[in-house]
Amino acid sequence: MKEVYKILIVCFLFLSCNNSDDNRNDNIKSFCSTENPTEDLIWLKSEIEEREQNSNQFSKYLYIMQSIYNEETIIIYGDCCPTCNSVYTVYNCNGEFIGIIGNRSEDFPTEVLSEGQIIWKTEDYVCAF
């Protein structure tokens, strides 16, 4: 009978263990814990609405991308302007500024751009990725 209890305890412990890496990967796949970030993240939706309302000659180059850095989802405000010296701003899932890509003091490597996915672009977007 004692052996049965030992087996049950081991099974219970095994089944109750939580692998935080698996949970982290699920959050990354769902992008900041939402399937529709451009609508569900209020701060991101507000940024998109502002960009759409304030269009100018450079608007056709604007996009917002999600990528992964150090196993965390990041949001990048970027552009593909061929004549601009662009600096890409990077935010976390809470909408907090966490660094830049570009210029001389890079907080994030440029590889996060090639590994990312565009989640929003202007209607008259002219660049091809």
Image: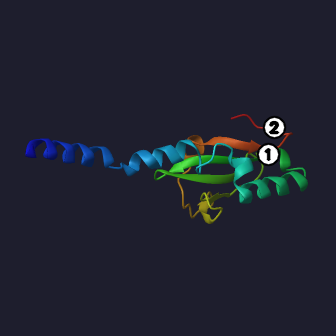
User: Which residue is located at x 25 percent, y 49 percent?
Assistant: 13
Asked whether the viewer can see residue 78, the reply is no
User: Which residue is located at x 59 percent, y 46 percent?
Assistant: 31
Disc 1 on helix, strand or loop?
helix
**Res 126 label:** 2
Q: State the image coordinates of residue 21 (x, y, percent, origin top left).
A: 40, 48
Colouring scheme, one of rainbow, by chain, secondary structure, one colour: rainbow
Please say if 35 is above or below 108: above
Please say if 94 is above or below 6: below
Q: For mark 2, does the 10 Å Cα neighbourhood hold few (<14), some (14 to 19), or many (20 or more) residues?
A: few
User: What's under tag 2, amino acid-wise?
Assistant: Val
User: Which residue is located at x 68 percent, y 41 percent?
Assistant: 118
Judge by depth and name the residue closer to the eye, 39 or 75.
Answer: 39
Q: For mark 1, does the 10 Å Cα neighbourhood hold few (<14), some (14 to 19), or many (20 or more) residues?
A: some
Q: State the image coordinates of residue 84 (x, y, percent, origin top left).
A: 76, 53
Instruction: State the residue lying farthest toward the top.
Output: 128
Asked whether the viewer can see residue 60, the reply is yes
Judge left or right: residue 26 versus residue 99: left
Judge by depth and name the residue closer to the eye, 114 or 66.
Answer: 66
The residue singled out by tag 1 in the image is 61
Label 2 close to label 1 by CB (< 8 Å):
yes
The quarter in which the N terminus is drawn is top left
The quarter in which the C terminus is drawn is top right
* 2 or 1: tag closer to the N-terminus: 1
Q: Quadrant of residue 104?
A: bottom right
Q: State the image coordinates of residue 90 (x, y, percent, origin top left).
A: 62, 58
Judge by depth and name the residue closer to the eye, 30 or 12.
Answer: 12
User: What's under tag 1, amino acid-wise?
Assistant: Tyr
Q: State the image coordinates of residue 101 (x, y, percent, origin top left).
A: 60, 56
